[in-house]
Image (cartoon, grey):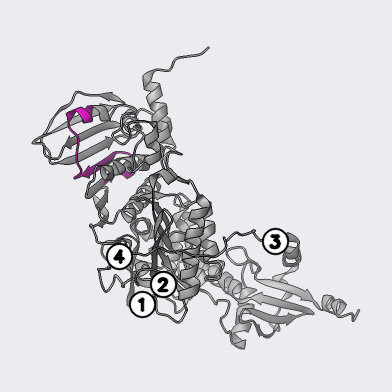
Amino acid sequence: MINTLSQETINKIAAGEVVERPLNAVKELVENSLDACATSVTAEIIEAGKKLIRISDNGFGMDKKDLELSVLRHTTSKISDYNDLYHIQSLGFRGEALSSIAAVSDFEIKTRKKGESSGWQISAKGGKKSEISPWAGSEGTITEVKDLFFNTPARKKFLKSDATERAKIIDSLEETALANYDIAFKLTSDKKTVFSAAKVNDKIERISDILGKQFASTLKNISGEHYKVLFDIYFTGRDDSLSNRKYQYFFVNSRPVNFPKWLSHCVYQAYRESIPSDKHPGILIYITIEPSEIDVNIHPTKREIKFSDENAIYDILYKAIRNALTTHSHPSLPVNSPVILKGEALKNPAVSQSHSQKTSTPIYLKEPKARYTPKTYNINQYANVFAKQDELKSDNFDNNIKVLGQTFDTYIIAENDGQLYIFDQHAAAERIRYELYLSQTENKNLRIQQILIPENFELSPSLSDLLQSNLILFNELGITIDEFGKNSFRITAYPALLGNISMEHIVKSILEDIESEKNIEIGQKRDKIIRSACRASIKAGDNVAHIEAKKLVNDLFKCKHPFTCPHGRPTAYKISQNELEKFFKRK
């Protein structure tokens, strides 16, 4: 039997495509503000947007007629016919957002058009709109979304924790602010300001405000024009690589979009000879292109963009980034040296808040296209190593183990009972420190050392929010961190077993490690923090004295699990005397 769906059901289904979580509502409403040419946008959320989302702007506003049409399905001021989809210049255009949000919330718009003496307001609960009434507010628009998904409990049930939903909103607002430096943004969560970014004169100031002065000071800039593409790229050099991909952004015509696989491949190919294989570049790519050369109408969230000539974009960006890295960059140059392909070097925002930009001249590079065949690995080449681990037994060792020395500043060579052992000094030191940290924490005898001069550092709003929600846990584990201003913190003490180290980098690495797993249980999070902190052990490349090497080996075999580091890598490899004699044809 075929049924005709009710309009209410149709609206809820449509809403499910556009509004999956509070983030989607925030994003759509903020984009409406930007399309209305607002120069100031304030977002307020309560309970991560589940209870309230309020977006206020000073844009053009709407008159009575437009306001009444705005909450209907498929009504939009951005396009008038199908052909306009190929010349999109606004962020929104589908005409679905307001009606979809109104279908699953208690929704209200208050607006006053510029130049008019008074404004109007309208509400819609569950898609059922009220009559329009006068409103005596200022020019611009205020949109409120209350009790999101109150009439779709199944959708509400699948929402994540407040911390996770809030983090997604913060990330989205950060991206939007990075894409629009000439607009002021403010975000409050449960009446507490999460971040505030004033209108600035150029991108590097906005990057400094959102991602931090320290990160911004490491960036270099290339900009230019090629064919129909204007590009402006801010990127880290050889000496400032990162431990993850967090600081990689892509903006097309001021629209934040996903970092696609082809672009990731392009960037990593350009960096291939510039950074270690386990490190990542920080990079913000801004592209301006004719709207007819892209298709943004791929997905309701408009996070994906298709280019008419993807290969051309690939080549333009690859050549520009690679030339900047290989032709101009040199390890001996200071961070802010003029290593720019076009334009000028960035000033350190910690010293100066101004950054003049020169008009770029076209870039025409004549190098062959960069294409890459992924390297393949033969798993059998590792089989012997892992087989050997099963044969290792800590009770085979005695205090007479003979340490022969160190090789490649990475491996410790030792001999015991007719066996030759090769120890990875970093993996071994990690295991020792990890088990000691666990033991002292469980027995409540963790020794703490105070820092004579506290380490001050700042974080992006999203990482700041994550740290604030985990401060108690850090303090329980001996890492004493205090808030020290907006998105700023200071470390005053840490566990003595970690040695004489800088804790700022460790704390940031820990946050990045747990960022993608906010919903893990507290015990798992505690273990992840301890594992991450123990990475600051003896490193590969550290020269280890003979007595220190002997102690390291002896301490390793006092551990409960001596043959893997806390992250699962092997700590030791064994070769018997018999195997060596067979190899050298002595048997």
How far apart are labels 2 and 1 at the CA level? Answer: 10 Å
How far apart are labels 2 and 3 at the CA level? Answer: 36 Å
Please check the rendered image and state whether residue 49 is part of the magenta-colored stretch, yes or no. yes
- Nearer the observer: mark 4 or 3; the answer is 3
Secondary element type, mark 1: strand
Q: Which residue is mark 4?
A: 488
Q: Which residue is mark 1?
A: 451
**Residue at point 38% right, 77% down?**
337
- Nearer the observer: mark 2 or 3; the answer is 3
Q: Are marks 4 and 2 in contact (CB under 8 Å)?
A: no
Secondary element type, mark 4: strand
The image quarter in which residue 509 lies? bottom left
- Nearer the observer: mark 2 or 1; the answer is 2
The amino acid sitting under disc 4 is Ser
Around disc 3, counting alpha carbons within 10 Å, would you say few (fewer than 14), some (14 to 19), or many (20 or more)? few
In magenta, the rendered stretch is 44-68
Q: Are marks 2 and 1 in contact (CB under 8 Å)?
A: yes
- Mark nearer the N terminus (4 vs 1): 1
Is residue 119 in view from this perspective? yes
Along the viewing direction, whichever of 78 and 31 lies nearer the viewer:
78
482 relative to 144, above or below: below
Q: Are marks 4 and 3 in contact (CB under 8 Å)?
A: no
The amino acid sitting under disc 3 is Tyr
Q: Which residue is mark 2?
A: 503
Q: Are marks 2 and 3 in contact (CB under 8 Å)?
A: no
Q: Which residue is mark 3?
A: 377
